[in-house]
Every structure is written in structure tokens, then in C-alpha cells.
Amino acid sequence: MHDVTYPEGTSCEMTPGLLPLDEAVALALAQVSPIAQAERIPLAEAVGRVAAKDILAPAAMPLFDNSAMDGFALRLADLAGGDSLPLAGTVPAGAAPRDLPPGVALEIFTGAPVPQGADAVVMIENARVAGARVQFHRLPKAGDNIRRAGSDQPLGARLVARGQPLRPLHVGLLAANGITQVEVSRRPRVAVFSTGDELTGGGTPGRIHDANRPMLLTLAREAGAEAEDMGILPDDLAATTRALAALGDRFDLILTSGAVSMGGRDHMRDAIVAAGGALTGWRVALKPGKPVAFGRIGKTAITGLPGNPFSAYTGFHLFAGPQIARLAGAAPAPFASVPARAGFGWSRKPGRAEVFPARLAGHDPAGVPILERLGAGVSATLFPLTEADGLGLVAASTAHVSEGDMIRWQPFCKGGLE
């Protein structure tokens, strides 16, 4: 299992009967294993996918000695009697390798192959062409401005490690090595359900629009999964059981929202068991988002998130997002690992770790971010996120936050939460 680190105190002084946050994350990850199947895809389609194996350099790079500057290639021994040489031609980038005749210089451009026999390149700023000769204002040393073959990377160097999510920089590196296809892990397959009779006919009296399913589908896809919309489950145990059982082993992860609390119509936990599965954990020392359920049905993991939208949003990033990363073969990134200072005072009841929308209010003299707390503990609306720059986190043991105290946060510009 990959290590996931949370701030000190997330597992102490918690409310009795609740899973500490770090243990809940570990339990969520324990439900899934990296997908064994891999596929070969074009390099141009690889961004966001996870490398299924180490990718090694097929050759040393650069492939040949080349000029690091626009300038003039020469043999140092030919300058023993002065500071100028006849100019005998030009070597453009892309030219075939050639020899340097004795006693002359060749104009050369960045990236062009250094002529055989040349042992330095004088940058153009340090030279002046006068007629058929070039005069040098500053004499070079051996090796100046020459990028030697193999100096960037040796043959067999590891360009990309197994489990590395591929980014544009990796695409550039692999393309520079002549690699046009890569072997990547199969995308995790995720089924997404919402639950609740109140979501059908959204917008009519007594009914509401379903925010969670569109949001979770988008979040799962951004995390690299193939997410399938499975619709809305009614507040009915038998119907929920049939829907879960009908999925068989089509998916790697089932993601639900709602029906995991203790109300009379919260059937998800019972339905998991009735569908032939097992409930491995329930209720987390987390605010908002206490009623989270973890389990398995056959080979498929199931994570039940709360129905309140901000709770579902938070639960995805704490639990489902790391599960998708692990399924894809990547190491889940730790949540809220960036140090910050509170730009607010806050007294709260300890016992549960708490996540809140946070706005960047500035930086202290050392450059540490200063955060403003938004949302005031609301779990049923996403609106505060529209003004937030990230998510803050305080430990379960925290009873009071004073202005200037160190806390943790997850910026939206990092970690894929945008």
C-alpha cells in the first residue's frame, strides 16, 4: 500500500466509534490494487495516463557532438599564431557530419553537428566577420560551447518510472528519444450512482437537482478513470441491492453518494451486504463527511460518500481520488500537505478532522501562504468553493486556531482539484 501522510493529530482525540482520518484513507486504499492490464497507445495520447513499466533510453543523448551556440567551430591549435582564421563555410542544424579542414573556421548554428577535428565553438557575440575572415575577441578553451554526445543521458537511462503519471514534459522527453508509443495501465473503470427519491424530477416542489453525480463523474474522469453514469437509485433497499448486484465485475470501483447515514431510508450499507458484498468500514472522524462507507462486492471496491455536495466533494479527494490513482498504478498524492498559516481565529469542538474552503489572503515574510476560512462549516453547498483557492485541513485534536497558527492546505493549483 502506498503511504499517505496527513498532519499530526488526525488520528488522535477523535470522536469514539469513528475511524481516524488517516486510518480511513488507508482502509479506502486497501480495497483496491493496481490494475494488472496494460495497453500500448500513441505518445500523443499519453498525457494523464500512468506508465505501466519503466521506459529506458534507447540511445545516449545527444546522439552526436553538437553546438550549444550560434558561432564558429575551430581547432584551438590553429589559433596559436593569432586571433583570426579564414572562414571556410557554414554548418546548419540538420546538416550531415563533416570534417573541419586545417587552419580554418566554420560558421555553425545551435544544434548543428560539430565538425570532426573541431575542439571549441566561439559564440557569435565574441567574434566579428570581416570579409573572408573571422576575428575572435575572446579566445576559447577546449570544449567551449560543445554539447558532447551522451552528456545529457546515457544509454539505458530511466526516462520514466513505472507508476509515473505522464505529463507534457514526459511526452517531450520521450519524443526526443524517438519513442512514439508507450505502455500504460488500463484506465480504472468507475460506476457512479446518486441516491434519493428527492433527486428525481429535480426542480419541482419538494425535489432538488442532482449535483453530486455530474460532479463525481467529472472528478473521476479528471483523475484518469473511465466513469460511467449509472443514474439515480431510489430510496429502496431491494432496488438498490439489484442495481449493485447487476454490475458484476464490470467495474473496478463503485462510487455512490447519499444513503450511507443512519436514517430510515439510508439503505446503502445493507444493500452492499445483500448484494453479496462486505462492508469493511463506516463513519470517519471527519467534518463534513462523517458517513462514509468502504466495502467490496466481489472483485469491485465500493465507496459510499455522503449526500451533501461539499461532503461528497471532500470525500472524493480524500478517498475516491486516491483509490483511482492506486488502481491506475500511481502513488496517491498526500492530501493537504502544503504548510500554511491561519489568517483567522476559530474555536471548534475537537474530535473530527475538518476540511474547509480556503482563500489565499497573502504570504508571511517567509513566503508561507496565509489562508482565510470560507464556508463556516456548511456541507450542503458548493458555493463557497467558487471563491476559494483550495481546501484547508485542521486535525481532529484541534480545539482552537489562532491567527498565525500553522495549518495545512491543498491548493487548487496543485493536486488536480480544480
Image (cartoon, rainbow, N blue to C red):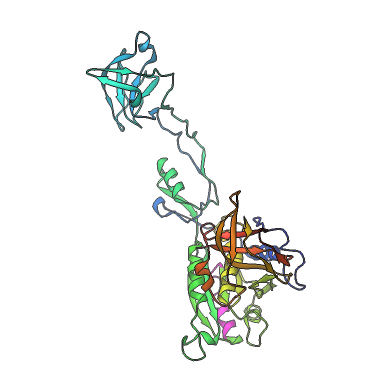
Quadrant of res 106: top left
Asked if residue 251 is among those painted magenta in the image, a careful observer would answer yes
Specify whether 340 is left or right of 156. Answer: right
Q: Is residue 405 above or below residue 275?
A: above
Asked if residue 103 is among those painted magenta in the image, a careful observer would answer no
Residue at left 37%, top 19%? 118
Q: Is residue 344 above or below residue 163?
A: below
Quadrant of res 409: bottom right
Which x, y percent locates residue 28? 64, 65
Specify whether 161 is left or right of 128. Answer: right
Which x, y percent locates residue 306? 61, 76
Q: Which residue occupies the foreground of this view, 62 or 127?
A: 127
Quarter containing the N terminus = bottom right
Quadrant of res 281: bottom right
Q: Is residue 34 visible?
A: no
Q: Which residue occupies the foreground of this view, 169 or 244?
A: 169
Residue at left 42%, top 45%? 172
Which x, y percent locates residue 339? 63, 55
Q: Is residue 275 visible?
A: yes
Q: Which residues are magenta?
A: 239-252
Q: Which residue occupies the foreground of this view, 307 or 408?
A: 408
| Name of the residue lying farthest toward the left | 131
| Name of the residue lying farthest toward the top | 81
Which x, y percent locates residue 177? 42, 40
